[in-house]
Image (cartoon, rainbow, N blue to C red):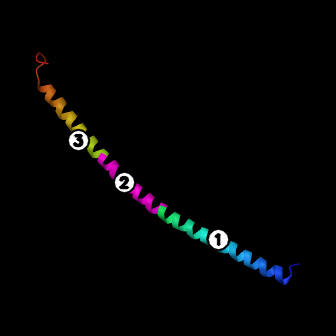
Amino acid sequence: MLTRKEHAHYSVVMDAELDSLDAKIVQLAQLCQRLRAENTGLREQLAAAQLDNRQLSDKIEAARTRLEGLLGRIPEDVR
């Protein structure tokens, strides 16, 4: 059984541990918020890069088609 003196010390130690745990939980929550925001930003950057990639691929395909058309108009003996 705890004496009054031991109980008071135990309570102080427990309070300190709870305060430390509370601070760690706050830090973890803040880290989660930062990571969520970073993740959102990265998803937006990825979507923009994918859109750019599709647009560039479409331009390359259009240029390829146009070039093939131009090459088809050149007589065989000139090629």
Q: Nearer the viewer, mark 2 or mark 3?
A: 2
Quadrant of the image for the C terminus? top left
Q: Nearer the viewer, mark 1 or mark 2?
A: 1
Identify the residue at horizontal 86%, vertical 81% (top origin): 3
Which residue is label 3 attached to? 59
Relative to 74, 29 lies left or right: right
Which residue is label 2 attached to? 45
- Report if the CB atoms under discs 1 and 3 are less than 8 Å apart: no
Relative to 20, 36 lies left or right: left
Task: Give, as a single range, the part of the protein colored magenta.
Answer: 35-52
- Outermost residue, bottom direction? 4
Give the Cα separation between the discs numbered 2 and 3: 21 Å
Identify the residue at horizontal 41%, vertical 55% (top origin): 42
Relative to 32, 18 lies left or right: right
Asked which quadrant contains residue 65, the reply is top left
Tell me the crowding category of disc 2: few under 14, some 14 to 19, or many 20 or more residues within 10 angstroms, Cα based.
Answer: few
Q: Earlier in the sequence, mark 1 or mark 2?
A: 1
**What residue type is disc 3 on?**
Lys
Q: Position of residue 41 (x, y in %)?
A: 40, 58
**What residue type is disc 1 on?**
Ser
Give the Cα separation between the discs numbered 1 and 2: 37 Å
- Which element is circle 1 on? helix
- Outermost residue, right direction? 1
Please name whichever residue, 20 or 70, is drawn nearer the observer in this view of the structure.
Answer: 20
Identify the residue at horizontal 16%, vertical 30% (top origin): 69
Identify the residue at horizontal 33%, vertical 52% (top origin): 48
Give the Cα separation between the discs numbered 1 and 3: 58 Å
